Image (cartoon, helix red, strand yellow):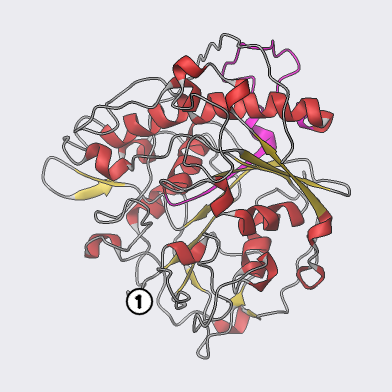
Amino acid sequence: MNSLSSQSTFALVLALAVTQLGCNEGKDDPDVGIDAGEDAAGDDAGEDAAVDAATDTADGAMPLLGCADPSAYDTSAFTRVEIDPFPLLDPALSLCAAPVAVNGNSPCVPHLVYTPTGDALEPLVVFLPGTNMEPNKHERLLETAAYAGYRTIGLAYDNTSSVQSACEMRSDCVDRCRSRVREEVATGIDTVPITADAGRDVLFEDGILPRLYRALRHAATLDPDYAVYLAPEDVAGEVDVDDILWDKIIVAGFSQGAGMASYLSRQHEVQGLVMFDGGADLCTDAAGGEVPAGWLTDPDASAGRPKFILYHARGFPQTTLHPGLVATGFGPAAHELDDAVGDVVDLDPPTPASFTNHTPPPGANEHNSMARDESMPIDFAGTDHAVEANEARLFEATLLRFCHACDDVTCPR
């Protein structure tokens, strides 16, 4: 662990032009993504299994133009540093009252920062973990993004309450509960009690925006290249929406983190968006129907930017795209990554929405098999979990989407 010097506490002014946010957690499992634990309305999320295989490329043969060679994966291609958020924040405005434990609980855990050892691509990948998960639960994905050539931050933030649980006692669509919860998780500014029974709010210093701002400022003291993601006129201790240069950032996340990444891309024009099994946020309207949450119907600041999602279909027929994914900008249909014998078939460039029905390894579930360490299978049958990033069955598919999340002008192919 790289120990960090203390920084003096500085006042943070967050002038954030935000409105809402959303992710799709299941009704039984706060970490569940698009389908599991939900009713049939949340289970139609893609394309029929009969994908046009004639245009697919067999597993192991995908041409990754302008991207790292998947067959040459090597952990020496990047370095890893832990940043303790505690010395960087005001403890009176955080759940974290002491230096964090490496194996502690969210949000009082280190940010993980991966830096390519060679020339890095311009964008920064910011990865947001799922509900009650920490960055060190997603190291294989973080390593994949770093191997693709990006500076990468796995951000610790307050994700300890799911959007589903926060809104289950509320009028959902009517009072834009999911939108307000997303806003609060992003900014740390109180918009709605996060848990209706306890009334605990996300504290300011544990919101995504303050955490990312402080992490970037500190990372720049370790490596000046990280300063390019903050506005040149930034004044230490004062953050507003323009201090973080979103057009240089690829936002990514899993489950609740996927929804938060999608929300942030809706509020700010980002370089790209990569989602893993989450973010298709629905709410119940006055007539009792399930419709996209309010924030998904607001203007999209990142319309036209590269967007990708990988999700597990959980055995349900994929005949129409999930309405939450349609509202996000995916569509009109999803691509199936599995062929008849369980090999990966993919497209280059990839379809924005893609799904699998692989079997999770022992002890894992379908949801976590898409992004969580020790849950991603090495093969379609799920005989074991991947230990290294390149052992994961969907390693090449994930690498390809990170590569294409940067546009062709910024990252020539």
The residue positioned 41% from the left and 23% from the top of the image is 203
So how many labels did they put on this image? 1
Extreme-bottom residue of the structure: 341
Instruction: Tell me: residue 64, above or below residue 264.
Output: below
Residue 162 appears in the rendering = yes
Give the residue pinned by disc 1. 315
Residue 348 appears in the rendering = no
Q: Looking at the rendering, in which quadrant would you find the N terminus?
A: top right
Instruction: Tell me: residue 410, above or below residue 62.
Output: above
Residue 237 magenta: yes
- Expressed as whole percent of the image width and height from the top left, the position of residue 333 reads 44, 65
Extreme-right residue of the structure: 118
Residue 108 magenta: no
267 relative position to 346: left or right: left
98 relative position to 314: left or right: right
156 relative position to 140: left or right: left
Q: Nearer the viewer, residue 109 or 157?
A: 109
For the magenta stretch, what is the residue range? 226-255
Quadrant of residue 191 within the rendered picture:
top left
- Expressed as whole percent of the image width and height from the top left, the position of residue 392 reads 61, 71
Q: Nearer the viewer, residue 151 or 160?
A: 160
The residue positioned 56% from the left and 8% from the top of the image is 11
The residue positioned 52% from the left and 38% from the top of the image is 265
Tell me the element at label 1: loop
Quadrant of residue 213 within the rendered picture:
top right
- Expressed as whole percent of the image width and height from the top left, the position of residue 268 reads 55, 31
Q: Callout 1: few (<14), some (14-19), or many (20+) C-alpha neighbours within 10 Å?
A: some
Quadrant of residue 126 within the rendered picture:
top right
- Kindly identify the amino acid type of the residue bearing the numbered disc 1: Gly
Q: Looking at the rendering, in which quadrant would you find the C terminus?
A: bottom right
- Expressed as whole percent of the image width and height from the top left, the position of residue 248 reads 70, 35
